[in-house]
Amino acid sequence: MREQAALKDLAGGIAVLAIAGAYYWAIGDIADSTLSDDVGATGLPRILAYVLAGFGLILTARAVMAGALSPAAGPAPSAPAPAEDDDHVSPVPRALGFLAFGVAYVVLVPIIGYLPSIALLIGSVALYEGAPRNWKTLVIAIGGATAFWGIFVKILGVHQPSGWFF
């Protein structure tokens, strides 16, 4: 079982490295304008490509250290059959649930605004993932929304949509 996880990490790391390489190659076509600063139009995309490649290298190294490339000592043990009471959710309905959260967010943002919409999104996803219905979940949703608002609006200067109510 551990070898399977290491092999998945190895494949994922190699895939991320390939994506980072393709992304870096693709940003070579971005032209610098006469209005560019020292960083230029490709500065941020290059940084993103480097960060993505770094994550790919970390994932690949973790897989190699976990023994993804070492020969198996014998047949891999089979996974135990899930018990009747295990919470098993098929990936497709779960993905559709997350898609519904995204659609609801897009619908609600122009009506109630960014801050309440993102708080509802954080709280709803937390509850969907099994978080307890208590004051901590509410505080996390409000705190997360406030943090995102502070990062995007105050620090980065990215104005978020305002709604009819907020």
Image: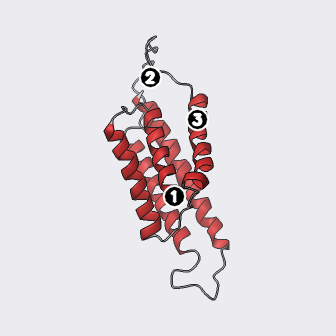
The residue carrying mark 3 is 95
Q: Secondary structure at mark 2?
A: loop
- The amino acid marked with disc number 3 is Ala
Position of 109 with respect to 137 (left or right) is right
Labels 3, 1: front one:
1
Q: Name the residue rendered at 56%, 48% in the picture.
A: 15
Instruction: Determine whether 65 is above or below 47 in the image.
Output: above
Q: Secondary structure at mark 3?
A: helix
- The amino acid marked with disc number 2 is Ala
Question: In the image, residue 105 lies at what x, y percent?
Answer: 57, 47
Label 2 – label 3 distance at C-alpha: 30 Å
Local crowd at mark 1 within 10 Å, few (<14), some, or many (≥20)?
Answer: few
The residue carrying mark 2 is 76
Question: In the image, residue 37 lies at what x, y percent?
Answer: 54, 85
Number of the label disc, if any, that sits on residue 3? none
- The amino acid marked with disc number 1 is Phe
Q: Are marks 2 and 3 in contact (CB under 8 Å)?
A: no
Q: Name the residue rendered at 59%, 52% in the picture.
A: 111
Label 2 – label 1 distance at C-alpha: 57 Å
Residue pushed farthest front? Answer: 165
Residue pushed farthest bottom? Answer: 34
Q: Quadrant of residue 77?
A: top left
Q: Quadrant of residue 113?
A: bottom right
